[in-house]
């Protein structure tokens, strides 16, 4: 499907025309009247996700759109324009646009297309499984036997290249890779804390993201119930809070 809006007499609006029209409509709602946009430049990017960008400089609106949007249904681009321009002009987009865009992103075929883009265009910059203190493969096997009866399929494992203190791990389904922050691979880190982070990421493999009423739920009810099975959960989270005084996530 072509990415353009069907107008009168069969005329189809281009992406540039869509963003220009929405900007003119939104501009009059802004508290402080922003400057006119003289031209719009849309570039299709080989983004490995649904990210789109918009900036206005010297009267030129520059828009970067993910390749995944090329085959989006009519109306999705207009919804995205309302959202992006609204953020720039500090005008809240109507709920219908948020719902339309979120509904498209969360559709099964859209998620499959985004996963394919990530596999094709995304690059995992990680290091190996053997750390200075912990071996991720050994940790994975231990958690697999203890909590999954040894039935979890093998996935790629890697330490991150950097030492993030707040984002301690993530599961990348496109590349089927669990990545733990190298910040955890140090002598003062209790094994229990690293086991918990590994277990948490393995739960993402066992309990994928759920979608309910167009909303994406990562840590849904089934996930949280399964997480309670970890022995020493409260202690492990306490150790992570001690190590990451500014807070953490994974």
Image (cartoon, rainbow, N blue to C red):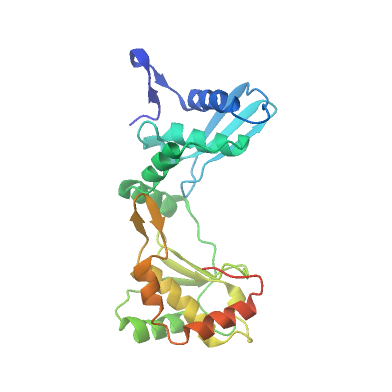
The answer to whether 161 is drawn above or below residue 100 in the figure is below
Residue 12 position within the rendered picture, expressed as x and y whole percent measured from the top left = 39, 20
Residue at the (63%, 79%) spot, across then down: 243
Question: Looking at the picture, does residue 156 appear above or below residue 86?
Answer: below
Q: Residue 212's image quarter?
A: bottom left
Q: Is 133 positioned to the left or the right of 11 in the image? A: right
Which one is in front, 128 or 171?
171
Give the total of numbered labels: 0
Residue 106 on image: x %, y % = 37, 49
Residue located 50% across and 57% down the image: 123
Residue 71 x, y percent position in the rendering: 36, 36
Q: In the image, residue 245 lies at what x, y percent? A: 66, 74
Q: Seen in the image, is 239 located left or right of residue 226? A: right
Among the 4 quarters of the image, the one containing residue 92: top right
Residue at figure coordinates x 42%, y 51% from the top left? 120
Residue at the right extreme of this rendering: 58
Instruction: Say if 99 sits above or below 176 in the image.
Output: above
Question: Is residue 121 shown to the viewer in this render?
Answer: yes
């Amino acid at each position: 499907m072509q990415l353009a809006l069907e107008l009168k007499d069969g005329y189809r609006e281009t992406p540039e025309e869509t963003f220009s029209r929405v900007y003119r409509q939104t501009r009059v709602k802004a508290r402080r009247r922003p400057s006119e946009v003289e031209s719009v430049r849309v570039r299709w990017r080989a983004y490995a996700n649904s990210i789109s960008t918009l900036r206005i400089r010297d009267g030129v609106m520059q828009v970067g759109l993910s390749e995944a949007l090329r085959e989006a249904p009519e109306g999705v681009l207009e919804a995205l324009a309302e959202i992006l321009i609204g953020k720039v002009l500090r005008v809240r987009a109507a709920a219908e646009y948020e719902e339309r865009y979120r509904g498209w992103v969360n559709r099964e075929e859209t998620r499959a297309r985004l996963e394919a883009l990530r596999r094709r265009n995304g690059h995992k910059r990680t290091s190996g499984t053997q750390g200075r203190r912990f071996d991720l493969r050994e940790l994975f096997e231990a958690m697999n036997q203890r909590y999954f009866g040894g039935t979890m399929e093998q996935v790629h494992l890697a330490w991150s290249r950097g030492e993030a203190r707040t984002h301690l791990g993530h599961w990348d389904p496109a590349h089927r890779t669990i990545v733990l922050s190298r910040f955890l691979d140090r002598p003062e880190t209790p094994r229990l804390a690293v086991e918990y982070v590994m277990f948490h990421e393995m739960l993402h493999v066992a309990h994928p993201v759920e979608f309910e009423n167009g909303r994406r739920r990562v840590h849904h009810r089934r996930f949280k119930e399964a997480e309670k099975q970890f022995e020493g959960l409260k202690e492990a989270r306490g150790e992570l809070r001690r190590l990451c005084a500014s807070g953490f996530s994974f």
